Image (spheres, coloured by chain):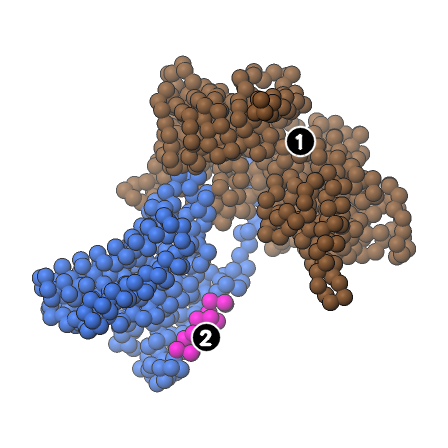
Chain colours: A blue, B brown
Amino acid sequence: MSATNTRFVRPLWSGRSAGNFIREYFVYIALVALVAFFSIASPVFFSAQNFANVGRQTAIVSIIAVGVTFVIVNAQIDLSVGSVFALCGMVSGLALQYISNFWLLGALAAIAVGVIFGFINGLLTVKLGVPSFLVTLGMLGVARGIALIITDTRPVLIANRPFFSIFGDSNILGIPIAVVWTVVIVALGVIILHKSVFGLRVFATGGNPQAARFTGVNTQRTIILSFVITGGLVGLSSLLFTGIAHAARPDVGVGLELDVIAAVILGGVSLFGGRGTIIGALAGSLIIGMMNNGLVLMGVDSSVQQIIKGLIIIAAVSLSKK
Amino acid sequence: MNAHAEAIPVEHPAGETVLVAQGVSKAFNGIYALKDVDFELRAGEVHALLGPNGAGKSTLIKILDGVQPQDEGTVEVDGRERSHSDIATVFQELSLVPCLSVAQNIFLGNEIRNALGLVQKKKMNSIAKELTDSLGLHLPPEELVENLSVASRQLVEIAKAIHRDARVLVLDEPTSTLTKADQLLLFKSIRDIQKSGVGIIYVTHRLTEVFELADRVTIIRDGRKVLTADVADMEMQSLVREITGTEPDEPGPAKEDFDRYTHPELTTTSSSGPKLQVSSLAGDRFSNISFTASAGQIVGIAGLIGTGRTELLETIGGVRRGTAGEITLDGRFVRFKHPWEALHAGVALVPEDRHRSGIILQHSIQRNLTLAHYKALRKGGLVDNKAARTLIHGLVDTLQVKTSSIDSPVQSLSGGNQQKVVFAKWMQPGMQVLLLDEPTQGVDVAARQEIYRVIHRFAEEGAAIVVASSDFVELQELCDEIYFMTSTSMSEPEKVTSDTTDQYIYSRLNERVLESHERDQY
């Protein structure tokens, strides 16, 4: 039967030109090129020690990027992750200091705050019909303001050894714990976005919300859940920061949302929704992280670093669109 | 043939050749979409361009228009290489700017200016008014296009084309969204334009229109020209044969194929009462609507555009909220607040606008169908990929969807095959009611027959089927019973017989519209 069906084929779309190939695998090609460039430019770049560093430094962006990939595939955006990141850390630190110095409480407090903000972001987006760009822009201010107010801008010190081991400075088989967390979250992200019914609904909602609705998808719930996932992951990644810093600070994570969004878009996730992969977003995060790391190793001034990073992101995104 | 006509303005008596395309070829990624096609258009003729979906009609008109360059061959108008202003095309996707007025659209890019370079609004408005009036479209030129009906927009497009003094007017499926009344208006305008000596290329899937309107017909299939002939020399049967390349009424796939993918319990519908009963339902743009549909029955709803047919189906299907009235399913009251509630109860809606609401174009067939069939395919929260592929291969085979792979994006399929994928979404256990809104819009003749077959099978499986269509030939062909709908009333059902022709349906509808007007007035 299927043999007879194929005789009408006009494979206008199946032709895969070199341009297509580059577009699809652009982020991986760019990643390899970047490794090659920094390896030549800086003698210490290409070492296991430095790669562990890159992995550790990139973990925060990578983990949040997994969540933001869900949001962007849904054709939404989340600008609040940097501020919520700071607030999660603060609430977690305060919970450990004032309620009980039990590591799990600190962890749950951070994740809960992230989930609540994600839920609010999602709820306002779907129920008020306000574009998520504006909702999360507003929440960016709200979360940062709360983070600064609760301690009158003072950092909160954390003294909890198990907390540091689980989220901060330990290694498993020589692999930094932050990298282990990244691998776990990326693996879960791949399974949920690419293998589950929920993931299918995320793609459908972002690809064509109306058709998704007519096919029985509760698009509002899908969107809210994607924001909740992002919030939870923002909470988790705030622990990776406080676990290293041994303190929560209300002024961290400024501009983090831009790194994350740049990473996700670099990774080939369409800003228009309906297209993208978790692994691509990870590769994009690694590019951002490696650029931070490599430019430091090359001794580039931090102001100049910003300029270079900005230009590279624009160039890379425009190339990946071609 | 005067291919060497002088390059000065000439009078164009009817019958003179206006446009000549010779040996036109076009390939995409090395695959020919058009191969060595000749086409000739005379002044003052309506020349129908026919062919199955994907035959290359769109490519040909884009090349004639100059939107797309040809790889080989020539296109000449009045013996010169055609320039862009020679040909005006009204594409299916209308190219008007919704937030501008009728006049502003007609003059877009071609505004009348005074010495200071400022736009002369009054002059433009009066010329636009004359133009639209001459097309039987009586509306103020300041009216915003976004407030117009689809039919009126189409006429504005045509006015824009006429204003540019084009020698050739190309209409790409202009009636696919029109009701009979609007269609008659359009045909009248076309005949007027014809008299002025403009050559008209008319692309359509509705073959009855060819006999009503066209002088000559050209058929292309698989990128090649099959024939050009006078319509007077053609019959419906021969037309269908040439378009599809097969004899009409080819037998479909065995029924057992279908049964494999549906549920046995569906066939044992026990209740003798109606499956779907709608009583005095009111909602957006309609009120006081009652009708019933029994298991295995195909019920048609005939209504003019704007009577709320789409809104009615969407209210039953949970897309919109009703304001009054009752819906029962198998005798139980239901009020669906969301489409997924309706689907859970086995009520599926096949929407009018396939691209917007029916399917996710850029996603693969597999992804689209898995989304709808997830209940049968999930294992834990995950999708059982192997089971999905088996099921979807089965569905694609059963419905004879022509595709190279179930991984192909839906947008790579022809319109008819896209619509089959939409139907494949609802070929699943427990389907009680199918609500079909314009089920074969933009679908070619051959695929249309196949879709009718699919609809009949849903009915044989015990589903109640409600079809709303502005194509009255379709209602006659497909339905057991027809209801005539105005926005404030529904008739008693009438059995469909050979007397229920499209003219009959049309006149019955007009009677009802008049009646309800009188009722509203007194």
The magenta stretch is A306-318
| Residue under the image location 79 percent in, 51 percent down | B165
Binning the other alpha carbons within 10 Å of mark 2 as few (below 14), some (14 to 19) or many (20 upward) gives few
Tell me the kind of residue under disc 2: Leu
Residue B421 in view of the camera: yes
State yes or no: residue B325 in magenta. no
Image vertical order of residue B486 relative to residue B107, above or below: above
State yes or no: residue A316 in magenta. yes
Q: Position of residue A166 (x, y in %)?
A: 16, 65
Q: Is residue A265 left or right of residue B167?
A: left
Image vertical order of residue B170 relative to residue A248, above or below: above
Residue A240 in view of the camera: no
Whether residues under marks 1 and 2 lie with C-beta atoms below 8 angstroms apart, the answer is no
The chain that hosts pointer 2 is A
Secondary structure of the residue carrying numbered label 1: helix
Give the residue at mark 1. B181
Quarter of the picture containing the C terminus of chain B is top right
| Residue under the image location 66 percent in, 46 percent down | B91
Residue A17 falls in image quadrant? bottom right
Relative to the observer, which residue lies in front, B254 or A206?
A206
Secondary structure of the residue carrying numbered label 2: helix
Q: Position of residue B182 (x, y in %)?
A: 66, 34
| Residue under the image location 87 percent in, 46 percent down | B12
Q: Looking at the rendered structure, which numbered label has been put on residue A311?
A: 2
Q: Is residue A194 left or right of residue B26?
A: left
Residue B234 falls in image quadrant? top right
